[in-house]
Amino acid sequence: MASIVAGTPWMRIGTMTITSTKLDLAPPILRFYRSTRRFSVSASLSTNSNKLDGEVRVRFAPSPTGNLHVGGARTALFNYLFARSKGGKFVLRIEDTDLERSTRESEEAVLQDLTWLGLDWDEGPGVSGDYGPYRQSERNSLYKQYAEKLLESGHVYRCFCSTEELEKMKEIAKLKQLPPVYTGKWATATDGEVQEELAKGTPYTYRFRVPKEGSLKISDLIRGELLTLLNSVMKVSWNLDTLGDFVIMRSNGQPVYNFCVTVDDATMAISHVIRAEEHLPNTLRQALIYKALGFSMPYFAHVSLILAPDRSKLSKRHGATSVGQYREMGYLPQAMVNYLALLGWGDGTENEFFTLEQLVEKFSIDRVNKSGAVFDSTKLRWMNGQHLRALPSEKLTKLIGERWKGTGILTESDGPFVDEAIQLLKDGIELVTDSDKALSNLLSYPLHTTLTSSECKAVIEDKLSEVAASLLAAYDGGEILGALEEGSAGWQKWVKSFGKAQKRKGKSLFMPLRVLLTGKLHGPDMGASMILLHKAGTLGVVAPQAGFVTLKERFEMLRQVNWEGLNKDQPLLESAATTVSS
């Protein structure tokens, strides 16, 4: 194996094949080249990296420093789908090394969000496993063990530079227009110099010794186009001279992120690292640590960022960004999962509606797009409506019925009125919370607002007052209530008869009836609406504070309309409030 020796490039150069049972064809092959000027490391994959002969193990590793962002949720979903589609394991690991910002409250919120989405993990917090513990804060002894191993092998050295010295190095590099890499003396210090500082109790960090020349290329399952064995088109590369020796252990004994991640992924036997593209720069450091510790490299797949409509990175300034926020807004987990899956992935067809089970069946990592995906809240809302209406009728009724009772619109959460109201209104409901407005709108009677609107002018001019007079006569004669008692057939029969008497049909009949009976120009089926309003008045299921205007109150208000005043500066309704309340 090639090794790194203090103060020199890697001395032994050759070809090293990392053995692995993760894929059925050749695993990642690291090739090392040495010339007079340049040192190169590249990782390439075989032509078929999807056929497996060993267990697939993936991980989602959130930091419990806040809420679960939709981008993180999509990363978790892609890991989950890949694992389930390959019969592998989905591991949840909590990366809580940021002691100042990490909280158990945030961790619990993340776990709750993942559970809500239906992304159950095989190993992790609350679930037993052979590779625990699954919180980085509980793995410090392991990190120290591997840090000491690197120190003994010469891949790491103690750095006693003060903060002031490090800042001065950065300033000098900036003046010389050079990368701000570490150039301190401790990379080449003698044992005597090191022992002298240790004796004085000087704080020190552990720095990883990076080769001074060369490059590193990673073949990415999403960003690399795999052509033929050992002839891959590499999309991701770095020059090592821009890196500098980096810290893996802080002076307080706490390990640094990139070191923890590498040790964790290797010791937890992670076969595929599927994560956001913002981790691409971390891959360089991690690859070097893998090599130094003699660990097999996992397969990498870096998923594109989720973008806002303006194609900037999605952030709080664009509105809701966390899973918890969408849950509180009334979104369904199955809709959230469906939509997140389509942000950068598709099955190659025009189909956009998937259940979680269907996604597991269809998902493949080679269909994940490497370009950014725009988060469209309007489409998410539409998709939620599709999933809402696809629910079994009993579940939909329970969901919305309990919502109506809970918000104080109805006094009961089930029964004939609830069933019929949901069937009537569901096509206009995309979120469960929309149901409040839909039902309240049905129960309301904004006649004054509608009659004084410009949109209603043509309806009024079409002798609306005459239709109103005939309608009041039909109500007073008991025709309308009688028809409603007979249900849909009775109502349709009465409308047909009323239209014949008025010599109206089609729009010239239904538009004035809708305005006079519902107080609106638009809405759900008028016949079903009227039957439901009649039941609401007789069954007593509407709460007093819901603002329901009964049929009796509607006709009393209609009776008070000052039709002549519609074209003058006069009150539209005369003593309507007194009439309704009496």
Image: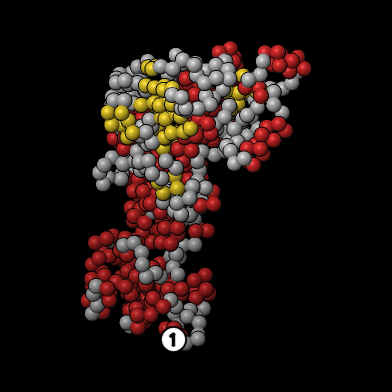
Using the image as rendered, state which of residue 577 and residue 375 is in the foreground.
Answer: 375
Q: Position of residue 183 (x, y in %)?
A: 63, 29
| Residue positioned 39% across, 76% down in the render | 455
Q: Secondary structure at mark 1?
A: helix
User: Residue lying furthest right in this view?
Assistant: 200
| Residue positioned 24% across, 72% down in the render | 506
Q: Which image quadrant: the N terminus?
A: top left
| Residue positioned 69% across, 16% down in the render | 194
Q: Is residue 212 visible?
A: yes
* The quarter of the displayed image where residue 33 is located: top left
Q: Is residue 394 visible?
A: no
Q: Position of residue 154 (x, y in %)?
A: 57, 15
Category of crowding for the residue at label 1, using alpha-carbon neighbours closer than 10 angstroms: few (below 14), some (14–19), many (at least 20): few
* The quarter of the displayed image where residue 451 is located: bottom left
| Residue positioned 36% across, 48% down in the render | 383
Task: Decide: is 82 above or below 268.
Answer: below
Q: How many marks?
A: 1
User: Residue lying furthest front in this view?
Assistant: 36
Decide if residue 248 is on the left or right side of residue 507. right
Q: Amino acid at mark 1?
A: Asn
Q: Position of residue 201 (x, y in %)?
A: 75, 18
Task: Decide: is 529 above or below 431.
Answer: below
Decide if residue 182 is on the left or right side of residue 289. right
Q: How does the figure colour the protein chain or chains?
A: secondary structure
Using the image as rendered, state which of residue 526 and residue 10 is in the foreground.
Answer: 10
Q: Position of residue 559 (x, y in %)?
A: 42, 78
Residue at label 1?
A: 567
* The quarter of the displayed image where residue 102 is located: top right
